[in-house]
Image (cartoon, rainbow, N blue to C red):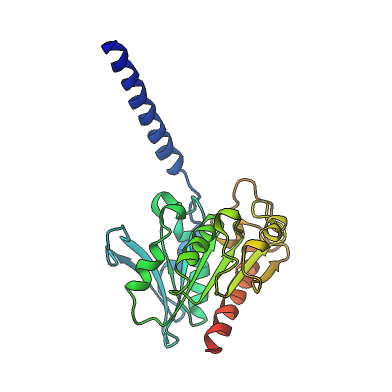
Amino acid sequence: MKNGRISVSKVIILSAVFLITGFFIWASTYSKASENSKLYLSSHSNVNVEVVENFINPGINLSRLYFFTPDKNDSRTCLIIYPGGKVDPKAYSTLAFKIAEKGIETVIVPMPFNLAIFGIERAKKVIEGRPDIENWFVAGHSLGGVAAAYFSESHSDMIDGLILWATYTGKSIDISDIDLPVLSIYSELDGLSTPEKIMNGKSYLPENTLYYEIKGGNHSGFGDYGIQNGDNEAEISPLDQHSEIVNRTVEFIENIVSSR
């Protein structure tokens, strides 16, 4: 019996090791940022780009953040970006830079294992570390948008608006009752967060949520990392899709800030 118990224990331990190892192998494969996105990781065109190491280290690892700050940063407004699942956070530098060009400071928050569900509270730590900012907005792409919605559910008092990029919520994250402006930007040819899924999730978002469809756009066009498995080819250029995302996002933020 003793040997039997030892054997069972060994099986359990080995099974756990295999599961953990399998997870790490799975998590280590992710969509890399394109060479084009790396062009936006250096300061130019009136935007200062800074990679901040050990931001505040408040018990969770925020060892690296990507800040995109306009030269004339007098709006006291900042947008936090939660990257999509298993996507290199640097793949969002193109959008972050172009949003900053329009006068809104932007910060990309990397996530554990490139999965925002493991770093839902990270926006809170960024906000707490920047008392100079008055207006806070959180945006998230795909799985990052789900995490951003979850964050807004419990911290709606800390932010002024939520922006969902190619994502939707469901029964597990029902934020229909929160008093917070929400913008949902989605694409006509998205093969993952399809327009149908976006519309089916409307009942789980506030009634006054604004929706904007990018004609000819796809799921992968919300970042700069190539085309994702399961997605459709876009009928517009990445430049055109990025332009629409940036313009609608900035318009949403500016309308809220100016109405105060």
Q: Residue at x 61, y 71 (%)?
A: 183
Q: Position of residue 179 (x, y in %)?
A: 55, 74
116 or 237: nearer the eye? 116
Q: In the figure, is residue 110 to the left or right of 247?
A: left
The answer to whether residue 223 is seen in the rendering is: yes
259 or 98: nearer the eye? 259
Q: In the figure, is residue 220 to the left or right of 158?
A: right
Q: Position of residue 87 (x, y in %)?
A: 49, 53
Q: Position of residue 12 (x, y in %)?
A: 36, 25
Which of the 4 image quadrants contains residue 78?
A: bottom left
Quadrant (top left/top right/bottom left/bottom right) for the N terminus: top left
Q: In the figure, is residue 9 to the left or right of 232?
A: left
Q: Residue at x 35, y 82 (%)?
A: 132
Q: Residue at x 31, y 58 (%)?
A: 60
Q: Residue at x 60, y 66 (%)?
A: 176
Q: Position of residue 230 (x, y in %)?
A: 64, 46
Which of the 4 image quadrants contains residue 69?
A: bottom left
The answer to whether residue 224 is seen in the rendering is: no
Q: Is residue 133 above or below residue 6?
A: below
